[in-house]
Image: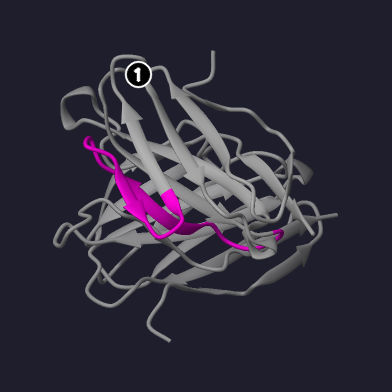
Amino acid sequence: RKEVEQDPGPFNVPEGATVAFNCTYSNSASQSFFWYRQDCRKEPKLLMSVYSSGNEDGRFTAQLNRASQYISLLIRDSKLSDSATYLCAVNMSPLSGGYNKLIFGAGTRLAVHP
Amino acid sequence: DTGVSQDPRHKITKRGQNVTFRCDPISEHNRLYWYRQTLGQGPEFLTYFQNEAQLEKSRLLSDRFSAERPKGSFSTLEIQRTEQGDSAMYLCASSSPAGRGPHEQYFGPGTRLTVT
């Protein structure tokens, strides 16, 4: 089983739709969680960190469910410019090692059409 | 531009040749990371520096790979005797222990390596 798993998609949605991605992680010692956006042949760009209480940034909402070991990203009112691959990443706690590296999922592709 | 920079952006080399990539992190970021990404996959961790000390290396980092950060600022990643399987995007990231997001990593544009 991969340490971080995502549905590869693609998710094809019309403009204005609401879309949600989930990401599951296998190591319960995971401590920090992030969503990155990656455009084709570009570097990952940090979209948002995911806090235990959940957090929102404009049209984007991230949530963490430690009991079920998954994080989610909700995008409201999708724009054409949201089309990209969304990568989730987790960082382990210092006690379990791997504290300094991010472990990424393979990403979920989103295509927003007119 | 105060982001992470990498050089070169593209490198085409023949199998068996050595290549070296450079990464300049965000100013005052003392943590620097190297990752490798192949098509359809997320970035995979290669190695981590805190200041000039290399504190963690992945098992992916074979003996042909070496990374340095001699003065705690820029870093280099060298691949000796390149193989076709080394073809990938090599990404550098940096982070700072301070601030709201102490472990938020910011990526450079990457070096795309093609081994022919």
Kind of residue sitting beneath label 1: Asn
Q: Chain of mark 1?
A: A
Viewer-nearest residue: A96 or B106: B106
Residue labelled with disc 1: A27
The magenta stretch spans residue A77: no
Instruction: Give me the residue at 45% from left, 65% from top.
Output: B76
Mark 1 packing: few (<14 Cα in 10 Å), some, or many (20+)? some
Place of residue A42 in the rendered image (x, y in percent of width and height, measured from the top left): 64, 63
Please, which residue is most extreme toward the right here?
B116
Q: Which residues are magenta?
A: A40-60
Asked whether the viewer can see residue B72, the reply is yes
- For the C terminus of chain B, the quadrant is bottom right
Viewer-nearest residue: A88 or B40: A88
Label total for image: 1
Q: Taking B48 as reference, is A1 above or below it?
A: above
Place of residue B45 in the rendered image (x, y in percent of width and height, measured from the top left): 46, 42
Viewer-nearest residue: A80 or B54: A80
- Local SS, label 1: loop
Q: Taking B99 as reference, is A84 above or below it?
A: above
Place of residue A106 in the rendered image (x, y in percent of width and height, measured from the top left): 60, 36
Please, which residue is most extreme toward the bottom here?
B1
- For the N terminus of chain B, the quadrant is bottom left
Asked whether the viewer can see residue B44, the reply is no
The magenta stretch spans residue A44: yes
Instruction: Give me the residue at 62% from left, 74% from top.
Output: B8
In this picture, residue B104 sits left or right of residue B6: left
